[in-house]
Amino acid sequence: MGWRHGSGEAERLQRAAAVELARAMEDDDPAAYERATDLLEQVLRIFGPGVPQWAPLHAACGNALLRRFQLTGDIVVLRESVRCSQVAVDAAGAVDAETRAVLHHQLAVALRHLFEARGNPDDLEAALLSARLSIAVPIPDQDFLASCRAQLGVLLRLRHLISGSVADIDEAVTVCRQAVAAEPKPGADRASHLNNLASALWARFEQDGGMRDLEDAVQAAEQALDASSDGHPERPLIMGTLGTVLRYRGERTGSAEDLDTALDLLDRAAAATERSSVRWPLYIANRAAVFRARFDLSGADEDLDRAITETAAALQRPDLVGAEYPGMLVNLATARAVRFARRGAAADLRDAVAALRKARALLSGDDPRRAVVTAELGACLLGRHDRTGSADDLDEAVRLLQEAALPGLASLSGSGVPPGSLSDPGTLPDPGRPDPGRPDPGTLPESGAISGPGAIPDPGAIPDPGPRPDTVANADPGQAEDDASSPSGGDRGSSRGGSGGGSPRGARGRGALHCGTAEREQAAGWLVNLSHVLRRRWQEWGDPADLDTAVRHAATAAQRLAAVDPRRIAALTAEGVARYDRFQSRGDTTDLAAGIAVLGEALDRTGGRRPGHGLLLSAYGAALAARAERTGRSGDLRSAISYWREASGTGAAHVTDRLDAAVRWGRSAAAFGNARLAAEGYRTAVTLLDLLAWRGLDGGDQRHRLAAWPGLAADAAACELTADSTARGSAVSMARGSADSTAREVTADPAGAISGLEAGRSVLWAQLLELRADVRDLHPNLPHDLAARLNRVRRALDRPAA
């Protein structure tokens, strides 16, 4: 569309503007775009409205302003771009169909950017109208038609993220597929269209949990990467898309390979992106999400630490205060809550509660993400109650989780979850670790009787065995928008100036809870945490109605979650321990049998590497021990001790779960009269005390954790002293009959008893003495450089706390 007409000064200015535009497009120089728009505005002032050049000059000015905004992020420039593009559309008159399509397409792109910047739904609706008008007439240029369809697909996906409309996301996938089909040859446009298709398929996967869509999204993103050369301006964005969808697949399938590949792709995307870009913090946030997913799979503490530090780094960007900011706060808070549960630093829990309160305050009452934040805050307050004993925290936790979960019961009562469906888990693992009903390990029961196992380890402490619950925090994996401005130039089919992900409504799980499969599953996940908090309140106040409701909610959640959904493990566990508690309270063996059944199913479904596996083993062992006490079946007790032994040695499990299992092992073996086996269990427990009060905690946190295990060292010493090398009996035979027991003979060892007693009673003192000793004295064979580094660490740890 030509616009260089006129004479004299106007013609000179138009020529100069054309030169600056050419330079700007070649160098992607914001200053050149600014000079070009200044020149075009001077021309417009010379001409005035009504001249033939009015529409094309405004279109050119709007296009240059749009690109300038994409490079600088200046919202004032974007608003002026929208104004110029709208004027061009209004003044176009009876131009040919293709020219009108170009003008509508440019306006749709500018309005979409304005929507992303402001979050005003009116901007999105106006953009959708312009996008539909751009394809309402036959367009001979098939490449440009593909770009228009791709733009419509992006806009429909954005509206779906707000409304949850199935029709919108289905149409988005359809038009994105049409755009890809129209670009069969490799090139910039094909890469962009494939990336848009991957994002649309990913969004539909989030809607209904269908793995086919996720697999197709991975395939489309891989093809997009193959279609982009090393110098392709969208290559980092495409790597970010592929990395994110691979992370989702890794979470769903438990594939460590997918997660490692996702991390590599996101590393490369971040390295290829300027830190000033709006995309950079989103890549960092998604990379942090991969670290969190790896932790959920393997329990590696370093992955959890990286998830926290990288999310915190992404949050340092002031321009994130808006769409993605609340979601990232939730990711940071949930990771800190899990680390508190794992390590016991009160500062982590304090910061998690503060971040969730801040995120909740940023979201309006009708924002669908508010329910997610409310549920996470309720779970964290339960953890804080367990640490402080605050009745107010417990009441607020119940209220918040009811507010989040109970409105979803209506959708839960509808049609069941389609078999095989998967979705993002909506539960935050309860960060508490109090075990209010834990049997007192301070005294040994009398020999000859099976001791009751006490309360099952609190399932609130079990980490979600599936993918992490970052339901509002992840950046859209890739938003490769087709910012076509004209069929004869500009950056048609290019998304290099796009936002790089993220909608004004947040991210994963951003849409309204519109009763799709994923939303029903999310509500079911929240019911699991509500079950935990009601069970805890029953333990505190003894209201049987709370325990009955806890059983009912957990059972409902388990029924509604698909068999392959990792959250079903948490639901089954919650139901099992609540039924066990009800059996302990009322003596109904039906509850005990049902509890063992659902705990056994959960154990069959979980992997041994996951952080929650140790707690589940311990809980199942406690239930079997209760049945052994009631029936006298020695096989159940053998199995229980075998499960406790395995749990105490599960490196991925929380140390409190491992310690609890070891103490149960020791107590039950001692009660059965097997002092040798009891001594082994207690010895295992004592060795875990140093890890329980690890050096990364401050003194108050260390003492708080150790205070939960009074008398442990004395019990261990008593078992050592009563162990008799000649004593055998049925208890020894029992140990030898266990598939997981080595039945090692442990002789009475007074010196070992004294050593274990001192080790258990002086954990903090021993740590202090170790910090005062030169590493080279303790380990003379260490390489010199390693010893020097360890000594530097030792001296740093020995400094007084600030």
Image: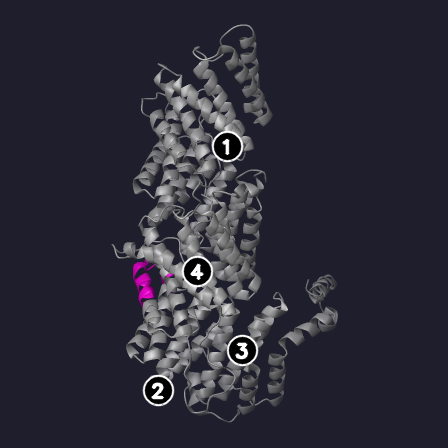
Indicate the position of residue 254 as horizontal and vertical percent values.
43, 57
Label 3, label 2: how many angstroms apart (C-alpha)? 29 Å
Residue at x 39%, y 36% (from the top left corner): 121
Q: Which residue is mark 2?
A: 632
Left or right: 694 with respect to 200? right
Label 3, label 4: how many angstroms apart (C-alpha)? 27 Å
Label 1, label 2: how many angstroms apart (C-alpha)? 72 Å
Q: Mark 4 touching mark 1, by CB under 8 A?
A: no
**Does the segment drawn in magenta span residue 566?**
yes
Amino acid carrying label 3: it is: Trp
Q: Which residue is mark 3?
A: 709
Is residue 393 visible to us here?
A: yes
Q: Which residue is mark 1?
A: 497
Query: Which mark sits nearer the N-terminus, 3 or 4?
Result: 4
Is residue 462 visible to us here?
A: no
Residue that sits furthest to the front in the current view: 392
Secondary structure beneath label 3: loop
Amino acid carrying label 4: it is: Gly
Which-is-in-front pick, marks 4 and 1?
Answer: 4
Residue at x 32%, y 67% (from the top left corner): 549
Q: Which residues are magenta?
A: 552-569
Which-is-in-front pick, marks 1 and 2?
Answer: 1
Q: Residues within 10 Å of mark 3 (few under 14, many from 20)?
A: some
Amino acid carrying label 2: it is: Gly
Q: Residues within 10 Å of mark 4 (few under 14, many from 20)?
A: many
Indicate the position of residue 411 as horizontal and vertical percent values.
29, 54
Query: Which mark sits nearer the N-terminus, 1 or 2?
Result: 1
Indicate the position of residue 591 as horizontal and vertical percent values.
31, 75
The answer to which quarter of the image holds residue 303 is: bottom right
Indicate the position of residue 407 as horizontal and vertical percent values.
32, 55
Q: Which residue is mark 4?
A: 378
Q: Residues within 10 Å of mark 2 (few under 14, many from 20)?
A: some
